[in-house]
Every structure is written in structure tokens, then in C-alpha cells.
Image (cartoon, grey):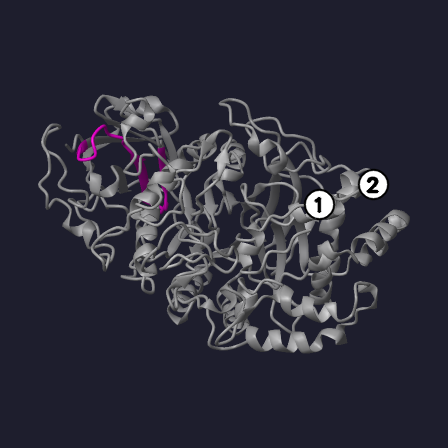
Amino acid sequence: RRERQPTAIMSSFLVALGLVLPVVNAFGATPDCDSCCPSSSADPEFVSALKELRSGLSLTMVEDEPFFPGYISGPKLAAEFGGEEGFHHGVASGSPTHDSLIIWTRFTPTEPTQYVAVTFMMAEGDDPAALSSSAALTGTVWAEPGHDWIAKLDVNGLKAGVNYVYGFTAAGKSSPVGHGKTAPPPGWMGTLTYAVFACSQWENGWFHAYDVAAHVKDLDLWVHTGDYIYEYGGNRFRADKQIQPPWEIVTLTDYRRRHALYVEDAGLLKLRSSVSMIAQWDDHEFTNNPYGNGMGADNHQPTCNGNRTKPGTACTTDEGDFLERANRAAQAYFEWLPLRRGPRATQGQVDTDLTIVVEWGNVATFLLQDTRIEARPAHGTLGLQEPDFALDFFSIFGAAAATLGTDVRTYQAADFSAANAYAEGMLNDPRWELLGAAQRQIMADVFSASKAHGKVWQIYGSSVVVPDQVGPGNMYKLLEAFPDQAGVLGPYLDALLPTAGAALFRALHAIGLVGQGWNPDSWTGFKHERAKLYDIFVQHTNNAVVLAGDVHDHFAYQMHKDGQTEPIGINIVAGGVTSNGWGGYAGSAFGGLGANAYNYFEESWVQADPYLKYVGVKDKGFWVIKANATHHVSEAIMINTDDLNPTPTNGALSRTPIVEGVLAPYYCDGSLVTTAGQKGSLVKQTACEIEFMAPSSRRRASSAPKQPHARAAVCDCLFEEKIGAQCHCL
């Protein structure tokens, strides 16, 4: 029922999930009455929006069910919420333009065949009371079983740069009130504030980073650079609650239920309702380490026999055709996120286009693209690929190091020239691409138009890191960086680095000696195409900013062409919301150095790479960025009391449930300023600029290191899974 329809709202008012052309009946016809039901053919447009599964059937998990008696494997229904129907997954908004905004909700019904008439309300401003005024925009659509009872609307004809409140009602229930914002008008030149996230793994703890970010003052937009969900199943718990579904997700229902589980986290629920978002997928939205050019993945077994990183333990049943699985994952992703589908008909073999473009006045152009499904081959993704085998960097350089003994002080760059020559030959192979020609052309077109219109910042979402990650490298350089602590650091490294458990660090020392990056799963594995990417940044941007994630820790890099030293842009890398990174290795290896252990480890990265201007591996968190006509200020916000707390985020805080009205402690770990017109500048400043609508914790401090003590054993293979490497344990 269209209660009110301003003339600016055209017949293209409703768009199903951003996946089809604007049509009124994208969710079925707009209801004429609250009690009627649509016909069985009510949704022809949406059914054709994704490729039909070639088998015609979704895979079942018959072999899993006996191990999880009583587990509900169908869609999420009211029975799982005490029998109460309602909007248990909140609301969200995203993909803002200067005159439109996508708003989202899901209604949880009682019956699996139920059709629900959902009424939305939307009004200018921040006051929820405006939703009851005569000026509010309202309308009614069907929430259907075929789309998991999701209502996702593309609202057009809105005012530019305006805050909006919105909400939904159905079956006597009301949703939470959501807040969103349209992009400013062309020519606008104010201050944009946005947050950047990556890698949120449910079983690693509650999403406090999202909760804290929802309290950033004047936050306009938040960006997720990938690994928004993870696919793993099995013995994974948060407190006494097991992950849902309790097996690795493969079917469309599996992916939908995993998205639902994540959104039920109070932090994510809060941020989604508070601020509009944009996002791109990385790999775990599908499964670990997929590659579109060949349509497979490290963690996909058509016939279950384990995978390379966790042999024999990765799957619980045959997983079928990867193309079918990828399409299911993509469908659930676009259903559950408030994103507008890209303009192309397909993205590789997966029939969705992840091309996100947002223009923010004359301050910035955002472009987010896929780096996993369309063009990526198995090479790099699973290590350096030869026809019949793969080698990861740690094996290549570690084997060379093993022939030299365990005293890294005797290693010379020349000792690893053969290993590096082999690696460089593979990394520069022109056959391997992450984007492909079609996506590179989109990037060139979008950014050249942005530059021509005088927009200051061209912001690119890559999902994976662009520069070579060199480090931690030669840890004995710490003695030069901290000469007053040489008497402690020297003996500690002498005792640590020759041990069997430190083989990983000896390999990294060797890699650092030749200035090589250690991660071929990133753009390091695709240097030939990266040169083309850099050419686009040089030719078609005023000031290039890359947002990335994937590696679970915070980094800030200056980008430069291979063989050149002049910076051409910056790469801000978001650490995990909860996903484990290098911190576990640093804690176990350097914990004996006391409160400064992590700072020493981080400094070893900076000493190895002059283009790395910030690194944070201890705590989980996110970036908050302010951009205007003259500056782009990037600030790392960490979830903890301060950087000297010896217990990292994932050691305690992440295990503490989120409580409404009580924020987890957080601190600003670094502020870096990029000046417009000075490409690639990243200058540290002592004071942070970001303000919160809650008190902040104290900033970085320093103290003397303690004497070494025995290292605890640890074996966390999550990081190896990200880069396709074998598991190395300390």
C-alpha cells in the first residue's frame, strides 16, 4: 500500500536486493491488502538474477545431522526466538548516492511457507518520532520465503547529504529504528568521516570493534573490505554457544544462517542500524582461498578428502560443484547486506557483479571491486603454482636458510639469490591476474572521471594488500633502534632465533634480506598486473588511497612502483575485528620481553621496510578516517586499555559479551596524515583527531622491558590458511 509517494519517487522505487533492474514487482507485486498472498509466480525477475544451480537441488548435509541431533537445519524461524515473530536481525542501510539509499530488514516468521507484508517508513532527520508524521514516506512490500524474508529497498528521490531515519512494521511488530545518510551533492567540499573494517570471525569473540565504531562522532559511512563472515564449522564456540550451522557452510540455507548468526551479534547489529555501509567480499564469504579462473578453492572438496592446509579435517561431507556453491554464497551475501548490485550482468562465472561506486561530493570517489572470483587463478592463492605442485614462500626461503644453519647473523642476501630468482619469475608471470582487463577498465574509467571533476581522493577497495609486505625481517636491527635496551634484546634474540620453533622467523629474515614480500596471496603474487594497477593510480587519480584487509593486522603503507622510490599513493590495511594475525606469534615468541614485547615486534617490521609507516599486531580494531579538501587523516582504533596491556584483545576482551550502554575499552594507537597533492605522504602526528560519543581510553605509553622468561607453546594455523601455507608452530 503506497500511503504517500512524492513525485520524486518514481516507479523504480523498489529494487529487489540490488540484483535486478528497477521494477515494482521485484519482491512480488506491492500488496493491495495486508491479508492477501502473492501467486507462486510472483518473483520472476529475482529468480533469474542468479544462475540456476546446475544440479537443480541444494546439497543436503545428511551425514552431518546425526552428529548434531536436534539442530534446526532449515531457515531461521520464530521458534528459535522463543516463538516470537519479529525483526530479530535489526535494520541496515547502504550504497548511498546523492539521491538514494538502500534500506534493509528481515522479518522472522512462524511458518516456513509464510508470506509477510512489511511496511517501511522513512523520514528526514535523526528523530524517530518523524516516522509517525504525515511527511514520512511509507509503503508495503512482501517478505517472501524465497528470499529468506528479507525486505531490501532502493529508495530514490531523496535529498543529498541528509540524515534519514527509517523503520519497518509487520504482523503487529516494529523493527528498531535505523539511521542512514545520503551522499552529499556534486561539488560539496566538506569533511567525510568513514571507518574501515576487515576479517570478523564469530568464534573468536564478540564484535566490540563494531560496537565502539557505532559511537564515532559524525561517522558518515563504514566500509568492510572482506571476510565479513567465515565458512568454518565444527568445534567452534562463543562461550557455551556453538557456531551455526555447526558444519562448514555449503548450501544456500547454510550461508543464510551463518549471515544471520553474525548479524545477531550486538555490536554488528548496532553499527548496521547506526550508519550506512558499503562492502566487498574477500574469500571467506565463499570459502578459504577461492580462485575464479578455474573455479575452485583450497577449502572446497567436491569429494571430501581434506585440504592442503588442514589435511583430513576440513570438510565433513562431499561439497559438490564449486560454481554452485559460489553462486549460493553470492546470493546470500547480496540478500543479507544493504548493497546495490554492480551494473554488469556477470562477474566471471558467478552471476553477480560486485562493483561498488560511491561519490562523496567533490571530496572522494569510492570504488570497491572483486579480487577473488572473477579473474584470480590458483597461482598465488595457494602458493606459487607450477603444473603439479605448489610452494609457499616460507618453504622456498626456509629450505635455503636451513642449509646455512640457525645463526641468522651469518645470512647474506646473496645466499638467497636463487630462491628469490625463482620467486620473482613466478610473481611476475603475465598470465596471473587478480582483476582482469574488464575490471581494470572500470577502475580507469571511474577514477579518470573523478579526477576530471576535481575530486580530491580516489579511494579503492582492494580486499588484499597491494604493496609487498616485507618483514618482520632482521630482528637484530632492533638493537640499533633501541640501543639502551641492547643488553636485554641481544641475549634474548640469541636464545630465541636458533630454536626449532623459530624456523618461521629465520625464513622471514631471509625473505627480508632480499626485500621480497612474503604473501603471494596478495598483489605480491601478481606483480605484472600490479604494475598496470599502479599505472592507473599515476595516470587517473589526484590522490590514490587503497583500503585492504585479509591479513588480520593493521598496516599503513606508502605504495611505489617496483624499482622506484617515489610514493604514488597509500594503502591502509584494516586489521581483524576478531581474526587472529601475527599477534599470536609475537606473543609466544617475545612475551618474555614484557609490556613492550609487541612494540618490539612491530618495530622489527618498520626496520625491514622503509615504506611501512605503521603496524599494529597485538590488538583487534578498525581505522577511522577523516578526509577533506586538504588532508586524509587515518587513525588506528584498538580494542583494549592501551598498547602496553600484555593481554591482547583476543586474549580476554573479545570473550566478554557486549552489554548495551557499556563500551569495551579502546585507544587510538596512531594517527597518520596524508596531504592532498603530496602523493603517498603518511606523516605521524602525536594527537588523534577522531572524537567519540563516549570517553576514550588513554593513548600509547612506554615502559622498560622485563627479563626474558620461558615461551609458551602455541599452534594457531589460521594465518597460514589465509596465505595457503603449511602450518608452522612455535
Q: Which residues are magenta?
A: 91-116
Tag 1 secondary structure: helix
- Residue 192: x %, y % from top left: 50, 44
Which sits in the foreground, 626 or 311? 311
What is the crowding at mark 2: few (fewer than 14 residues within 10 Å), some, or many (at least 20)? some
* Amino acid type at mark 1: Ser
- Residue 322 placement, left or right of 645: left
- Residue 372 placement, left or right of 429: left
Which sits in the foreground, 673 or 494? 494
- Residue 258: x %, y % from top left: 38, 41
Instruction: Tell me if residue 96 is in the magenta stretch.
Output: yes
In this view of the protein, can residue 28 be seen by the observer? yes
- Toward which corner of the image does residue 67 lie, by quadrant? top left
For mark 2, what is the residue? 705
Which sits in the foreground, 97 or 624? 624
- Residue 186: x %, y % from top left: 39, 50
Q: First in sequence, mark 1 or 2: give its number.
A: 1
Q: CA distance from mark 1 to mark 2?
A: 15 Å
For mark 1, what is the residue? 588
- Residue 426 placement, left or right of 587: left
In this view of the protein, can residue 162 be seen by the observer? no
Locate the N terminus by quadrant: top left
- Toward which corner of the image does residue 33 lie, by quadrant? top left
What's the residue at 48%, 29% (across, down)?
A: 240
